[in-house]
Amino acid sequence: MDAKVVWKKRMSFEGSSDSGFTVPLGTTPDVGGDDDGLRPLELLAIGLAGCTAMDVISILAKKRQEVTSFEVKVHADRQEEHPKVFNHLTIEYVLGGKDLSREAVERAVHLSAEKYCPAQAMFAKIVPIDLKITIL
């Protein structure tokens, strides 16, 4: 995989990768930005959420679980000093559906964490991750 960012102006960039899709990157005015795009660390958290979400929804479909709503929330605590790296992550899976099996959901979440999601595997090597499941 190859990815790049192209500078547009001031602290504004456009990111792209092999898929051809683009995403705006920016920052706040207090550091010279125009508040016109996602922050790079936000993209890392979104990438983590998306990676595990795709695994979990796919596994649940194979288990014939009737999911009607699903979101993955990533809460990232950051170090106070520079570099302000993530120092703890909580991934919360919030699902609604008809007769969802808690056991099936837990299995899907753990398969994603332990076997399938490369983003989660990378982060797990450097920062503690807590998993939370909420079934509505």
Image: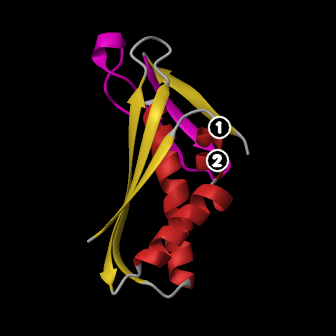
Q: Residue at x 56, y 65 (%)?
A: 55
Q: Which mark is residue 125?
A: 1
User: Compared with residue 47, is residue 53 higher up or lower down, i.e. above or below?
Assistant: below
Q: Are marks 1 and 2 in contact (CB under 8 Å)?
A: yes
Which quadrant: the C terminus?
bottom left
Image mark for residue 114: none
**Where 16 falls versus 58 (above or below)?**
above
Span highlighted in magenta in the image? 11-37
Residue that extends furthest to the front in the rendered view of this protein = 103
Q: Please give left or right for residue 45 compared with residue 124 in the image.
A: left
Query: Image quadrant for the N terminus?
Result: top right
What is the residue that sits farthest to the right in this orientation? 1
Q: Looking at the rendered structure, which numbered label has been put on residue 121?
A: 2
In the image, residue 129 sits, relative to residue 116, either above or below, namely above
The percent coordinates of residue 28 (x first, y second) are 32, 21
Q: Is residue 19 magenta?
A: yes
Residue kind at label 1, given as amino acid type: Lys
Q: Badge 1: few (under 14), some or many (20 or more) residues near its Cα, within 10 Å?
A: few
Q: Position of residue 16 (x, y in %)?
A: 59, 41
Q: Quadrant of residue 101?
A: bottom left
In-front residue for pair 117/110: 110
